[in-house]
Structure formats: C-alpha cells, structure tokens
Image: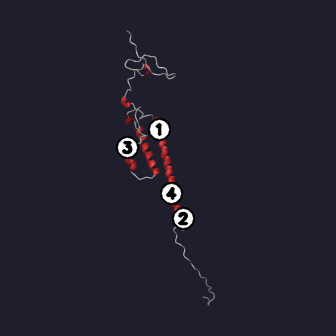
Amino acid sequence: MRLTMALCGAKKRGNGEPCKRHAVPGSSRCKLHGGKSTGPKNASGNQNARKHGIYSQFLTDEEQISFDSAELERVDDELRLAKVLIGRVLKSLGTPEETGSKEGCGSGSNLDQIYDRYLGRIESLTKTREDLETKRLTNEKLRRELEDPNKGLPEPKQVIIGVEDASDPEAE
C-alpha cells in the first residue's frame, strides 16, 4: 500500500498551470510556495494589514469636537475637513516607536502621496477662501459707493455770492 502525497496547487504565473511539486505535510503548498512558512517573525511588528482610516466616512470624537469648534462657511468647512484628514495621515505615518516597526505604518511613499495631495488641497482651499474674501470686500465697497455717491461727505448747500461794486456809493 503506497500513500500518495498531495500536490502543491499553486498556480504558475505564465500559463496558470498548477505546481506539480509535493505539498509539505500539514500544508497545502510546497516549500517554494510558502508551505514551510511559519508566518511573520514578529506578529506585533507586521503592519501589512493595518488600516490607517484616512478615508473613513465617520469622524472620531476628537475630530468631531475639532470640526464643531467654530461656525464656518462652506469653504472653511472643506478646509477644516482637509486638516482633519491630514491629521489622520500624520497619525498613520506615526513614529517608529508608536507603530513598533522600523518605518511606521504602511507604504511610506503611498502615505506621502496622500499627505502631499491633502497639503495641495489645503493650499487650494486657502487661496479660494482669500479670493472669496477679497471679492466680498470689493462688493461691499461698491455697494457702499452706490448707496452714497458722495462717499460720506455732507451734501453741498446752495451758496449765493453777491458781488457789489464798492466804488459806487449809491449802489446797494
């Protein structure tokens, strides 16, 4: 009686054929496809599956307090939300001491790109806000000029200047 060993079952990249090597006992894969793997050396240091939460649709309690702290206009709301999101990115980047790994959470270049995108968004919103404020002040100035064309000066009164000939004593 001969026992047959299970085959690996991993698919080849090029043509999709299954691997024909024998699987490692206790696993469904051969040693070349991870059958002998014991997992990460340090489970607490493995940050691959960590979720950074930057795109979360809900605000944390701390972020909600920060968001509600002032009554803002619409552009200011977007600016504040971008600042909250950049705070999430910075928290996700973290320091090596906080994350327990050498380089922080996740792919550094990916988070750097997200950080740069939100910095650009904040810059754009700030410029838009300044432009809107300039337009508002210009419109207010024009409205005041239209309401009061004399620019706050008093209305001129009728002035009658009478010229008399001082050389003629009979003239009056």
Residue drawn 49% across the image and 49% down it: 126
Q: How many marks?
A: 4
Please name the residue that numbered disc 3 is placed on: 60
Residue 2 or 164: which is nearer the viewer?
Answer: 2
Crowd around label 2: few <14 · some 14–19 · many ≥20 (10 Å): few
Please name the residue that numbered disc 4 is placed on: 136
Residue drawn 39% across the image and 50% down it: 68
Please name the residue that numbered disc 1 is placed on: 112
Pointer 1 and pointer 2: residues touching (CB < 8 Å)? no
Label 1 sits on a secondary structure element that is helix
- Spatial CA distance of label 2 from label 4 is 15 Å
Residue 96 location in percent, x, y? 39, 35
- Spatial CA distance of label 1 from label 2 is 51 Å
Q: Quadrant of the N terminus?
A: top left
Relative to 121, 100 lies left or right: left
Front tag of 1 and 2: 2
- Which badge, 4 or 3, is on the more N-terminal residue? 3
